[in-house]
Image (cartoon, grey):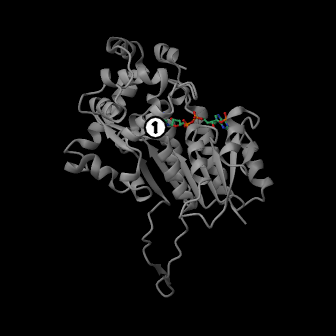
Amino acid sequence: MSRRILVVGATGKQGRALISHLSTPSPDHESESFQILALTRTPSSQASQSLTLINQSISLLKADLNSPSSIRKIFTDLGGKGSIYGVFVALQFPGLGANADAELAQGIAIADLANEFQVQRFIFSSLERGSESYDQYLTLDRASKRDIERHIISLPNLPWTILRPGFFMENLSGTLGRITTSVLLAGLNPSTQIPLVAVDDIGRVSSQILTVPSPSLPCDELTNECEQSSSPKYTHAKIPIISSLRTPSQMLQSHLSATSTPQPQIPLFLARLLIHLNTHTKNLIDDINRIHTTISSPQSKWGEGGWTCYLSKNAYDFVPENEMTSYEDWARERQKKKDGGGEWGGWNGVRIWDLVRGRR
Ligand SMILES: NC(=O)c1ccc[n+]([C@@H]2O[C@H](COP(=O)([O-])OP(=O)(O)OC[C@H]3O[C@@H](n4cnc5c(N)ncnc54)[C@H](OP(=O)(O)O)[C@@H]3O)[C@@H](O)[C@H]2O)c1
């Protein structure tokens, strides 16, 4: 029987990337077949229906994370405990400066259900925050992601993996991308390296984690000790996913060298005004500066190694660093698609007016 994988946030950027990778035969899982269950509030929507173009045998399941009973019904209808092999979860961004209590409740509900119904892989896609040293000061959706992570970790029988993706390269697409580029240039310290990730890489790493075979290792019957697995550790692991580190000016240079065109921007004085007007945009900038300082300062626990050391044991175990999407690769691809930015309406669904008002 094929293994069922439930994708929460299936019509979103990360879920869609995961579904693409799960649907592409790879040496790691070509002999296995997976049945993809795409959770959506609206199976008839264009976004949901377009998933059937990626995978014809995908099942679109209607449920709402705000109604845990609708999610429970999915598990029970499919046969109860053990009927779903793996669950991937990306939750919708609550909005700039918005209360994130609903996100927290959604994350806890899906983790509890996955635990109760004994899934064998559970991935929560959280957020890179430069270690946990600043956790007590986090607010809004960052605090809710921290608390969802803590809840997941408190479930000892849940084989969880927490992914911590960096700043999506897709945030730099389209009209909002022009503004975001200038906000990064105007607000960040010149030496701050932006931990960029292509959403496709999140899908690739998640697909690897969901499909890598469980290690079956010889155990010593007397001592009950098992040999150490040589396969990458994904269970009970917190994994940052960063595809490319670039300072703001390196980002511009990379774009220029990859595409022979300057990265689109708005005038810097407008970006400065935006940062001045909008506390949440300013907080975002401060956060990227803080993350860089935390990891790269010689006094950090990663020492002189900084980012290299921080990133050495993580997503690169699943997708080697040189196979991750560089910013150059991403810019070239975007150029090819003649990106207009209209496809998904900006990063985290935030719109230009939200940036000015400071909320969504
Ligand atoms: N942008 C960044 O740089 C960045 C970096 C790191 C982490 N993140 C995090 O990434 C997350 C967003 O991921 P994404 O961009 O892949 O998502 P997205 O494209 O915004 O899509 C949101 C998904 O959530 C689903 N959804 C929303 N409300 C739901 C509900 N009540 N019940 C069931 N499904 C619901 C939507 O499905 P339907 O509409 O089909 O129901 C959709 O599939 C956020 O938590 C954000 O903080 C973002």
Q: Position of residue 339 (x, y in %)?
A: 50, 28
**What residue type is disc 1 on?**
Glu
View extreme (right): residue: 77
Which corner quadrant holds the C terminus?
Answer: top right
* Residue located 44% across and 52% down the image: 238
Quadrant assignment for ligand 1? top right
In the image, residue 124 above or below residue 119: above
Residue 129 in sight from this viewpoint = no
In the image, residue 75 above or below residue 120: above
Mark 1 within 8 Å of ligand 1, using the beta carbon: no
Q: Counting other residues with Cα less than 10 Å from the Cα at mark 1, is it few (<14), some (14-19), or many (20 or more)?
A: some
In this image, 239 relative to 85: left or right?
Answer: left
Q: Which residue is mark 1?
A: 333
Q: Nearer the viewer, residue 202 or 49?
A: 49
Which corner quadrant holds the N terminus?
Answer: bottom right
Q: Nearer the viewer, residue 333 or 173?
A: 333
Q: Nearer the viewer, residue 187 or 120?
A: 187
Q: Position of residue 254 (x, y in %)?
A: 32, 35
Q: Position of residue 348 (x, y in %)?
A: 53, 30
Callout 1 secondary element:
helix
Residue 114 in sight from this viewpoint = yes
In this image, 352 relative to 120: left or right?
Answer: left
Question: Residue 198: which quarter of the image?
Answer: top left
Q: Position of residue 334 (x, y in %)?
A: 46, 33
